[in-house]
Amino acid sequence: MSWTLLRGTLHQRRASIFWFCIGLVLYSWLMTWFYPKIGGGRYAEMIQSLPPEVLVIFGGTEVPFASLGGYFQTEYLGLMWMIIVAAAVVLFAGRAFSGEVGAGTMELLLAQPISRLQLALTRVAAFVGYTVVLSAASFVPIQAFGPAYGIELGAKTFWTLFAFGTLFMLAVGGLAMLLSAVFRDSGRPSGIAAGLLVVFWIADLVSSVSKAARFFDPINLVSYWQPGKIINGESISPRAWWIYGLVGALSLAAAVVLFRRRDVA
Amino acid sequence: MDAISTRGLSKYYGKTRGVEDVSLSVPGGAVYGFLGPNGSGKTTTIRCLLGMLRPTAGEATVLGHQVTLDGAELRRRVGYVAGEVHLYERETGRWHLDYVAGFRGGRGTLTDDLVERFDFDPSKRVKELSKGNKQKLALILGMAHDPELLILDEPTSGLDPLNQEAVYGVIDERIAAGRTVFLSSHVLSEVERVCERVGIVRSGHLVAEENVRDLLGKRLRQVEVRFAETVAPSFLADLPGVDSVTALSEVVLAARVKGGAIDMVLKRLAGRAVTDITIEQAGLEDVFLEFYRGDEPANPPAPVAGEGSEGPGSVTSHRGGAL
């Protein structure tokens, strides 16, 4: 791994890293602060007045809406959080290789004494670090500010949420990085990865109201995302951990292999 | 030992040819000019030499090592200035210098000298720099660590004559210090000024490899003679090696004279009263154009980033000596 490249990568992405993190911290704090005002019984009453199809859109399908987990999943983590972190990781990972190839700066980089393996592994390391920072920006405010608003997650719940959220981002961003190792510009990898996520989300939506669409569930990254269960102290299916872990690890490994073999100019 | 040698180097982009069967050798300690119009395959060849592109066939050796896509250690000994400069727009020149120094284990020994000679201000962001200043930064980044081999792809593009001369000065000094320079260019005066040996690439093929001095020996001269009395064009037209004889007036003839035919022309003129004579030495450009006359191949090379989209069929000649 190259520390110079790692520092350079993070330096060049400093603005987007800063704004995404600030956004997540503020959003998480806002949702935590908001919980005592609308959570609990009043929240359940409000939710029950909504059509079931609308609730499905917000990801509230597998957890009771009146619970803490149901609140966070429906109001934040089940949709808005997914959109924010997906945008962050897809943009970051989608530019990892193809962004520099398209911009022409890869030529400057590969004129330096750094191997492609070093370069690729450093970019993967930067991405993994970014997902950890995004998870921290998402979940630390809930853990830190929660007690002031009557929310006690507990250490185990917090770390499980942290790890599961990081794995989700690695899986989504890993796909974008894999595409980035193949294409010549950053637009297409990000676009295709984002499109894939939308397809996952629509498939999840349809499968919630129609059994006919459930054939897609075993590989649907969105369907496995059930943070409300973790917050409520329930366990997540081992398959979800495996799917996220495997998709993330395999796509990142494939990105490294493909980048080492491709033409970069 | 050759600093660069290629054998049967070919690169296809799908079915489109970039370069084909290029075999060249660049002796160590020399300046080698790689000459060809936009789109002829110069940049493709360079990118194969640097391991940025995987050759479809053939092989390349640089500084005694076979080129591979992962050749990090080889690149430590090579400096490269790309033809089309792409830098990180939001970062400053200083940031770029530090970034490259980080990869190379410290600041290049020539950094301060080059910054001063090019009169470059490293405190500005790249997006605030003119094309010429971006080119200066690219040159400093490529040359600062005093590499054994400098690969320069159209290095003076966008530079004013003063800075062009500064680049030539640096090249001269590096050669004096025992370094090797591989200079890709379509600026003939540049090649004539700094190169000892030249390879001419046409439609992806290396069509000639000669010493610049030998090439210049073959050059054409444009002769214009003012006589004291009326002379017909036939007075010079029958000489071998003389063509395009035209009467500019009753007493002025103009002709194109190839290589050694100038001796016969002068001897013929000695028999007449001449009031004025102008012999304009055509540059390498005319020699170069000789290689581009005739039918073009049916499958022109793919224009690649860094090379213009102008294909060999649209070679144009400019007074400045660029093609």
Image (cartoon, rainbow, N blue to C red):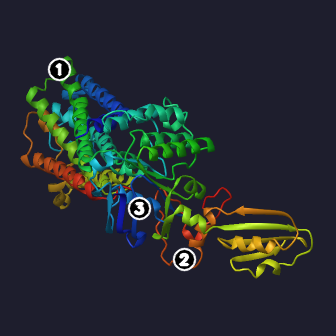
Task: Inspect the image, locate mark 2, and give the three-letter code of the amino acid beneath it.
Answer: Glu
Task: Inspect the image, locate mark 3, and give the three-letter code of the amino acid beneath it.
Answer: Thr
Circle 2 marks a residue in which chain? B
Q: Which residue is mark 1?
A: A150
Circle 1 marks a residue in which chain? A
Answer left or right for A250 relative to A84: left
Determine the secondary structure under disc 3.
helix
> Mark 1, residues whose alpha carbon is within 10 Å: few (<14), some, or many (≥20)?
few
Q: Which residue is mark 3?
A: B45
Circle 3 marks a residue in which chain? B
Q: Are marks 2 and 3 on the same chain?
A: yes
Quadrant position of the N terminus of chain B in the picture = bottom left
Q: Which mark is residue B127?
A: none
Q: Which residue is mark 2?
A: B296
> Mark 2, residues whose alpha carbon is within 10 Å: few (<14), some, or many (≥20)?
few
As rendered, which of A241 and B94 lies closer to the eye? B94
Determine the secondary structure under disc 1.
loop
